[in-house]
Amino acid sequence: MTIQVVILAAGQGKRMHSSLPKVMHALAGKPLLKHVIDTALAVAPGKKPVIVYGHQGQILRDQLGEQDASWVEQKEQLGTGHALLQAMPAVKDQDRVLVLYGDVPLISVNTLNKLIAATPAQGLGMITARLPDPAGYGRILRDAHNQIVGIVEEKDATETERAITEINPGIYLLQGSHLKKWLPRLGNTNAQGEYYLTDVITLAVNESIPVQAVQPAKTEEILGVNDRIQLARLERFYQREAAENLMRQGVTLLDPERVDIRGEVRIGRDVVIDVNVILEGRVVIGDRCLIGAHTILRDTTLGENVEIRPHSLIDGAQIADECVIGPFARVRPGTQLGGKVHIGNFVEVKKSRIAEGTKINHLSYIGDSKIGRQVNIGAGTITCNYDGVNKHRTIIGDNAFIGSCTQLVAPVTVGARATIGAGSTIIHDAPPDKLTLSRAPQQTIDHWQRPLPESQK
């Protein structure tokens, strides 16, 4: 039988106090709902999850509409049972329906696979957990034989029932044919006037359908996000887990509490990462790299033995082996650095290819450029690549030497082994093997006198 995942994501999230739908708030750089979609696709590969949306649903469709999913609208938010009912036209009788939630982002594939394996084909499976503070959750009711016989929502619970610490996160595995029979029978005679999905447990027990409970490896997996405090707590849990996974793989984190992973990261052995480093998007770091403090790497690949010095931002770049970058460097998208390139302090590089051994060590801007091997670019050099409408290319040949405070006005080519005198503005191509410079004649004004303030005249 096929696993059909249904993700309930129609809630408003009033306690977030936000114009953004709750499930679109980010955890580890990714919307809560996207975490759940990715998990659904891992549990049931090749099967589109059904997403039930409602409040501000167009924002969800606009931002996540390209996901491999089917979208169903819940026009009125009348409870979880009513929400799941909206998905039934997309469910086959023989499907095993796995119910997830767009605001429970960290449920693991392992826990869900455990639930699927433990639940009989015609049975009902659910995840439960024991919390020291169960406030806000429905409580699990068991009989004298420790069998689950129902769930009571907190607002409908007695004082005795509220003392129960086993809670219901709301994640179920049910037969499609059972749901199509039970969901239309749900009532809304309760404290919230809603159609509770939890009531299907009682219907299952009444029909002698076995109910199987499975516990998560860690309780944080089943915690939902209702406000920004809960979101921050799950963020810290996620980051702690990610940091420990990296350390198990041979990465040294000088302070595991001060590294943030916000994407898909692959890191080699003997890499050292200092404090307050952020890794965003797709980041690949080769063996024996050193990442300095307060650095951001975004959608970037580093080769082996690369040193990123503190306070640097590397975004959308390909960095080859043994490069040294920073401190206080910015490498922007579209940049490719060959081996042993040095990009120094307060240097910005954008959309440029820089070949092996070239050094740009101080206070320079290089944009839309192709730079050869073993080039030395002096402090304060600028490629003037934008004319207000179009971007133009600067090309510098192998072994060229660019003097300090040079302006290269693109489009312009500097030949191989050329030397550009310091302080030049180069507006025409500079030939190879020659010195090219442009300077106004230096003058000394003999009878000039520095102006004095009125009090000294």
Image (cartoon, grey):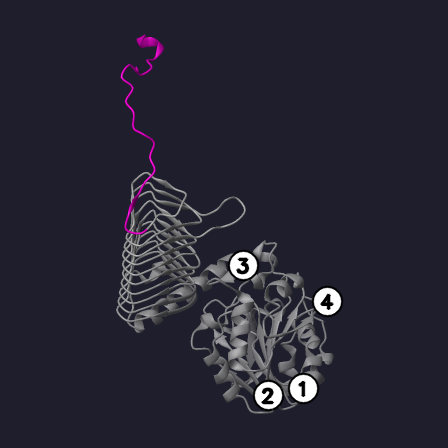
Crowding at label 4, few (<14), some or many (≥20) Cα neighbours within 10 Å? some
- In this figure, which residue is indicated by the disc labeled 4? 75
Disc 3 or 1, which lies upstream in sequence? Answer: 1
The boundaries of the magenta stretch are 432-457
Disc 2 or 4, which lies upstream in sequence? Answer: 2
Instruction: Tell me where residue 209 appears, x and y as whole percent.
Output: 61, 90
Compared with 308, 171 (above or below) is below
Disc 3 or 4, which lies upstream in sequence? Answer: 4
Question: In the image shown, does 312 or 88 lie closer to the viewer?
Answer: 312
Compared with 346, 115 (above or below) is below
Disc 3 or 2, which lies upstream in sequence? Answer: 2
In the rendered structure, the answer to whether residue 385 lies left or right of residue 254 reads right
Distance from disc 3 to disc 1, alpha carbons, whole Å, reads 35 Å
Q: Residue at x 27, y 59 (%)?
A: 357
- In this figure, which residue is indicated by the disc labeled 2? 2
Q: Main secondary structure of the magenta part?
A: loop
- Amino acid type, callout 1: Lys
Confirm whether the magenta stretch covers residue 161: no
**Helix or strand or loop: what does disc 1 sit on?**
loop
**Helix or strand or loop: what does disc 3 sit on?**
loop
Q: Residue at x 48, y 79 (%)?
A: 109
